[in-house]
Amino acid sequence: MSDAASTSVPVIETRALRKVYAEGSEAEVIALQGVDMRVDRGEFVAIMGPSGSGKSTLMNLIGCLDTPTSGTYHCDGVDVSTLDREELAALRRDKIGFVFQGFNLLPRMSAEDNVAMPLGYAQVPPAERSRLAIEALEAVGLGGRTSHRPSELSGGQQQRVAIARALINQPPILLADEPTGALDSKTGEEILALFKRLRDDGHTVILITHDAEVAAHADRTYVMRDGEMHEEGGEA
Ligand SMILES: Nc1ncnc2c1ncn2[C@@H]1O[C@H](COP(=O)(O)OP(=O)(O)OP(=O)(O)O)[C@@H](O)[C@H]1O
Ligand SMILES: [Mg+2]
């Protein structure tokens, strides 16, 4: 784990983060305009906001899958703009678990192999990969579906495979984009309980949701509107 000095450093800190798609063209979209966000270790934070308000764009930046047009992002005290491709890949692998909106599962692979993906082939021997993947699937209630392919699973089950994959490396930061959107309320509750357990174990969880009832489980809620972020309970 990390040294004592890092406990006071926010896990996620963005300053004046801006993202403009197709800048200067007719199709220009200002997706984020000056987002300041600070999340400490062990917090469970929800992000709400209407469709198109910039939630996934922000999540992609926090997950180091995309780069901002301007502004800064420090992940665990590191300015990610200073990292080269390999360092960025290592940061993603070691620190961040990502549950994508729409799962992103590989159709030709079994649930077990999908979940084992982030482990990397070089670092982890096959038997260990398998053990960890099955454990992660069991944690989301899918121990009986390890050899099923995504097309042989229900929507909610595919979503849970995506969550198991995000958790396989025990990442300190879990980013989840609408992870309960396709789930029935009972399964959704189980996933939320899982996120709370992770939070209680010291993980940081950031959850995008349209559902105010889901957001109510978080410690804090941010609301995005037209690319701007406001903290709920702050000035509205
Ligand atoms: N790759 C892209 N190129 C151009 N415009 C984009 C791109 N990705 C997103 N946008 C635009 O940026 C804005 C923010 O999109 P984003 O996906 O962040 O919204 P969202 O809040 O996640 O919405 P939803 O709730 O529907 O998932 C939208 O107007 C969208 O059309
Ligand atoms: Mg989205």
Image (cartoon, rainbow, N blue to C red):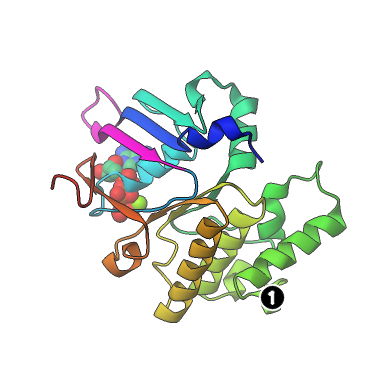
Residue at position x 33%, y 47% in the image:
55
The image position of residue 124, as x and y in percent, is: 81, 48
Quadrant containing the N terminus in the rendered view? top right
Q: Nearer the viewer, residue 66 or 21?
A: 66
Residue position for label 1: 143
Ligand 1: image quarter: top left
| In the depicted structure, whether residue 203 falls above or below residue 109 | above
Label 1 sits on a secondary structure element that is helix
Would residue 181 be visible to someone looking at this image?
yes
Q: Which amino acid, mark 1?
A: Gly
Q: Is residue 68 above or below residue 55?
A: above
Rendered residue at 69%/52% (across/down): 117
Q: Residues within 10 Å of mark 1 (few under 14, many from 20)?
A: some
- In this view, the residue in front, 28 or 115, is 115
In terms of image quadrants, where is residue 67? top left
Q: Residue at x 44, y 38 (%)?
A: 62
The structure residue drawn at horizontal position 44% and vertical position 73%, both measured from the top left corner, is: 188
Q: Nearer the viewer, residue 138 or 113?
A: 138
Q: Is residue 226 left or right of residue 56?
A: left
Q: Which residues make up the magenta segment?
A: 18-40
Q: Is residue 31 magenta?
A: yes
| x, y percent for residue 128 | 83, 57
**Quadrant location of residue 216?**
bottom left
Residue furthest out toward the top: 82
Left or right: 121 as drawn, with respect to 67: right
Q: Nearer the viewer, residue 73 or 112?
A: 73
Residue that protrudes farthest toward the left in the picture = 236
Residue 89 highlighted magenta (yes or no): no
